[in-house]
């Protein structure tokens, strides 16, 4: 009888280990996630406005229909990337999101001093070169040091009225996302 309960217990423990392993491994292996959806939208280091509701990317990303969105895939392997432009006076948020889902940088219109958005992203090796003054930078540029090379910058704006959404999409299309 003791052997029977030992085997049952061992089977439950082993089943639990397999179950947890699959739960932790499979999401990283999925090809139907937000990262791959944004990857299909456009090229690296280029700002793209995500089209309005009804678009397939919009529905796959499950975006809030009240906001207007723009995204830029950042690849720091070719050099530091800057994102700059003038954002609307409405409420907006900007975030850098890593492949693993972490958010190393985020800001909103409430924490920013003005409507000018001007950041530059650097990986660790570029940060070391930055301290040696190897880059000529705009003094108003906000420097963000990031631990990896690949990120997605998401900028979203909340229009006060739906009629303003088109103008805000045009405003977001004017943002630049390029290597320095």
Image (tube, rainbow, N blue to C red):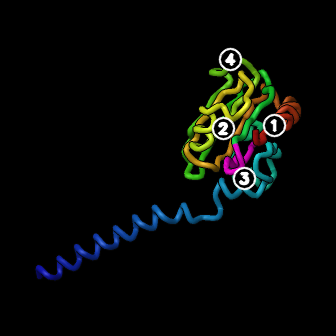
Q: Quadrant for the C terminus, please.
A: top right
Mark 1: few/some/many CA within 10 Å (<14, 14-19, 20+): some
| First in residue order: circle 4 vs circle 1 | 4
Quarter of the figure with residue 68: top right
Q: Residue 176 has which mark?
A: 1
Residue visible at 59% across and 64% down in the picture: 30
Q: Which residue is mark 2?
A: 121
Q: Which residue is mark 4?
A: 113
Asked if residue 33 lies left or right of residue 19, the reply is right
Distance (Cα) linking label 3 and label 4: 29 Å
Residue visible at 55% across and 61% down in the picture: 28
**Is residue 34 on the magenta stretch?**
no
| First in residue order: circle 3 vs circle 2 | 3
- Are circles 4 and 1 on residues that touch, CB within 8 Å? no
Which-is-in-front pick, marks 4 and 1? Answer: 1
| Residue 107 image position (x, y, % from top left) | 63, 29
| First in residue order: circle 2 vs circle 4 | 4
Residue visible at 88% across and 31% down in the picture: 167
The residue lying toward the viewer, choosing from 16 and 101, is 101
| Residue 166 image position (x, y, % from top left) | 88, 35
Q: Quadrant for the N terminus, please.
A: bottom left
Q: Which residue is mark 3?
A: 38
SS at circle 1? strand
The residue lying toward the viewer, choosing from 60 and 48, is 48
Mark 4: few/some/many CA within 10 Å (<14, 14-19, 20+): few
Quarter of the figure with residue 50: top right
| Residue 13 image position (x, y, % from top left) | 28, 70
Q: Is residue 62 visible?
A: no
Q: Which residues are magenta?
A: 71-79
């Amino acid at each position: 009888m003791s052997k029977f309960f030992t085997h049952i217990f061992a089977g439950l423990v082993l089943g639990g280990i397999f179950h947890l392993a699959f739960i932790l491994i499979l999401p990283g292996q999925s090809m139907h996630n937000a990262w791959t959806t944004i990857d299909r939208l456009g090229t690296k280091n280029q700002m793209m406005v995500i089209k309005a509701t009804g678009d397939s990317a919009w529905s796959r990303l499950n975006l809030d229909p009240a906001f207007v969105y723009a995204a830029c895939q950042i690849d720091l392997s070719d050099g530091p990337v800057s994102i700059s432009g003038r954002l609307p006076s409405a409420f907006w948020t900007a975030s850098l999101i890593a492949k693993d889902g972490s958010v190393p940088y985020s800001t909103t219109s409430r924490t920013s001093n003005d409507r000018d958005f001007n950041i530059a992203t650097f990986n660790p090796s570029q940060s070391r070169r930055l301290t040696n003054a190897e880059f000529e930078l705009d003094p108003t540029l906000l420097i963000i040091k990031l631990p990896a090379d690949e990120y997605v910058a998401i900028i979203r704006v909340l229009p006060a009225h739906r009629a303003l959404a088109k103008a805000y999409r045009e405003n977001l299309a004017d943002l630049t996302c390029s290597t320095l």
